[in-house]
Image: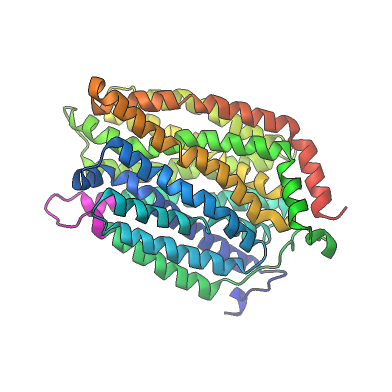
Amino acid sequence: MSELTANTAHPSKRYRTMVLLLLTLIYAFNFIDRQIIGILSPFIMEDLGLSNSQMGLLKGFLFALFYTVVGIPIAWLADRYNRTNIVCISLAVWSGFTALTGIANSFLSIGLARMGVGIGEAGGSPPSHSIISDMYNKDERSGALAIYALGIPLGLGFAYFVAGYALGNPGSDFDWRNLLIILGASGIALAVITRILVREPVRGAQEKAKKDAIEIPFKTALKTLLSIPSWWAMCFGIALASFVGYAVSAWQIDYLLPFDGSQENPFGFQKMMYILALANMIFYGGGTFFGGALAQKLAGKSVSYYALVPAVSILICIPLVIAAFWVPSTALHLVFGAILLFFLGMYLGPSFAIAQTLAPINMRAMSTALFFLILNLIALGGGPTAVGFLADAFKEAHGQVHAIRLAITICTFALVLSAISFFIAAKVLPRDWAAAQSRNEGA
């Protein structure tokens, strides 16, 4: 194991690739356990007798509230203590609560389990982003974080696939409860493997910083972080874009199943799940990788492209969301949905890179936690929940399918605000980038 043994100051390329892939896999589990509720939503609603509003709370607010609140103290720990331990413990915790979700028998019990998943997942991304940033320099960081962000489409794709495989056979007695229990057990096993293989890297190893530059007092570093205009603009840009992304992914199956069933030649649940799995892996994954690579290449001309690439991709998403939910067939919905996934993925890598590069070295986990605090309160807490309440408001007059269509169309306006935020970030980013480089390298 000599080539895979961590030299924490100067890790080998093979070792850091292994760590990056493991953290990406953990991030994939993060999104499997987070989004599986949206995929299983029709089954859970029928089994437990829940309303759209209750499901919206389970998919959004109840998860996001604890995910965001707990993220700040966990990030504070991650900026001071062993980040590998924090990631592994968090993975085990959220996986355990995913398994408990499978035995819930009421709105209260499943709501408590979802809160537990949120608490556990709060310790996943902030320390992972910090670990990656200490293993890849600022010129490689956008690409590395774009690979890490592939955990989102891979996790979503796998969630659709296993749901289709496990629940798409009418003669099988395998149900949504069994699926959640198996996913939870698998996550606990991955936590053990990661703890064995990954070691803690040296903080700030890629910046060549002086000792006194690394040991910035907490309050000073926090004040510095919160005073960076482009950090705020990028943060609101990704939050508002993700508001729509989470709304679509959380309610797409609730929309498609009755919509597809009313067509002359329905796709059926299993075929639909397999198509959505491939769309997320190929198109969402391709967009995520392409966005990070494109921004990193164009940044050689100007770092403003870290914000301009997301801004343009978000503008393209606006007509795609509306078209996907107003076309007259399932096939056309899936086509427009796949193209939408490609452009929705493009803002992830550049945005994550900005959150890390602009942060003081000993504030990288905190930067990600604050980034995700705003992102998830607005996006994960707001998107699915807003659609749930709007759908219930429209349902009596318009029926379930058209109610969800109207709710998502209204929510699409957030993409306009997202693009504006990214354009604002592009204007001020060069100045903030230069200041961060000077601060972090002790110049």
Q: Residue furthest front?
A: 108
120 lies left or right of 417? left
Quick check: is 170 in the magenta stretch? yes
Task: Describe residue 143's horizontal placement relative to residue 360 as left or right.
Answer: left
Q: Which residues are magenta?
A: 163-178
Residue pictured at 30% horizontal, 62% vertical: 181
> Is residue 302 among the parts visible in the rendering?
no
Residue farthest toward the left in the current orientation of the protein: 171
Q: Residue at x 19, y 27 (%)?
A: 263
Front in this rendered view, residue 68 or 238 = 68
Q: Residue at x 26, y 59 (%)?
A: 103
User: x, y (%) of residue 304?
Assistant: 71, 34
Q: Which residue ends up furthest to the right in the rendered image?
A: 443
**In the rendered image of this protein, does residue 396 appear above or below residue 71?**
above
State the colouring used for the structure image: rainbow
Quarter holding the N terminus is bottom right
Q: Identify the residue at horizontal 24%, vertical 20% (top origin).
A: 397
294 in relation to 319, above or below: below
Residue found farthest to the bottom: 2
